[in-house]
Amino acid sequence: MSEAPGAQRVLEVIDADLGYGDLQVVFGVSLHVHRGELVGLVGGNGSGKSTILRAISGMIRPRGGSILLEGEEVGGLEPHALALRGLAHVPMGRQLFPDMTVEENLSLGAYLPPARERRAEGFARVYELFPDLHTKRREAAGALSGGQQQMVAIGRALMLHPKVLIMDEPSLGLAPLLVREVMQVIRRVADTGMPILLVEQNVTQVLKIADRAYVLENGRLVLDGPTEQLRGDPMIRRAYLGL
Ligand SMILES: Nc1ncnc2c1ncn2[C@@H]1O[C@H](COP(=O)(O)OP(=O)(O)O)[C@@H](O)[C@H]1O
Ligand SMILES: [Mg+2]
């Protein structure tokens, strides 16, 4: 293989400065996701996690730095252009249409022409991963459990046949038992080879399932590394794991 060193990085953020109007909230953040990797981005409320995801998915324009998708600069592209290039975003709060069926919600993820042509393949892939959703495919999405609704949100993103999946706080608002279930679901998706950037306040859970993680405080990265290393880090244990 004669690939360039950076070619294994499906997603890369380099020295990003981000903010809203005059307010800068993210300072010089660099991170990357390798092919086949589940990477966590953790930090407290207001630390800038969603802002980074918004920049990656094209909802805000970076004021400085680069965002690369498979080595190509994509910073400042519109969300639909990024989706066409294979970036799928599972938004905070799932944002399903509760009165539409599971299948109708899933099909919304395949509205772009390349994905539309591969709809049948997309459904097969999602139903193989989440057999419960196949059973409930004709039911209203709003009637499903919280964990199953999160599967629909992830499944809808997978219908795009993305190169990388980014997720904002999938555990938010779920009871502890469901949080563990959703985390196992995310790990299962990653095990199919799908690269994932997972943003979470739930540091304990991310350190259990992710391969690597970055820790954000007040808009700056303070620590990163393999999760097995972070689990033993004194600062992490004190500040995030309550040990
Ligand atoms: N649309 C916005 N306009 C102005 N400030 C914002 C906006 N969204 C978020 N912020 C501010 O940016 C900072 C980081 O927010 P956010 O990225 O949402 O953090 P997190 O996702 O880690 O909780 C916070 O101080 C927040 O108040
Ligand atoms: Mg957030």
Image: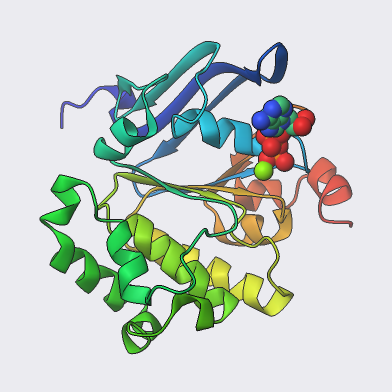
Q: Position of residue 124 (x, y in %)?
A: 21, 73
Q: How many marks?
A: 0
Q: Is residue 59 above or below residue 88?
A: above
Q: Quadrant of the C terminus?
A: bottom right
Left or right: 153 with respect to 92? Answer: left
Q: Position of residue 139 (x, y in %)?
A: 39, 85
User: Residue 121 sits in which quadrant?
Assistant: bottom left
Q: Is residue 75 visible?
A: yes
Q: Is residue 160 above or below residue 120?
A: above
User: Residue 222 sits in which quadrant?
Assistant: top right
Q: Position of residue 21 (x, y in %)?
A: 66, 15
Q: Residue at x 68, y 79 (%)?
A: 177
Which quarter of the frame holds ligand 1? top right
User: Residue 135 sits in which quadrant?
Assistant: bottom left
- Front-most of 24 and 178? 24
Q: Is residue 182 above or below residue 89?
A: below
Q: Quadrant of the N terminus?
A: top left
Left or right: 26 with respect to 90? Answer: right
Q: Residue furthest front?
A: 99
Colouring rule applied to residues: rainbow
Q: Residue furthest left?
A: 117
Q: Is residue 220 visible?
A: no
Q: Position of residue 200 (x, y in %)?
A: 65, 50
Q: Residue at x 65, y 37 (%)?
A: 49
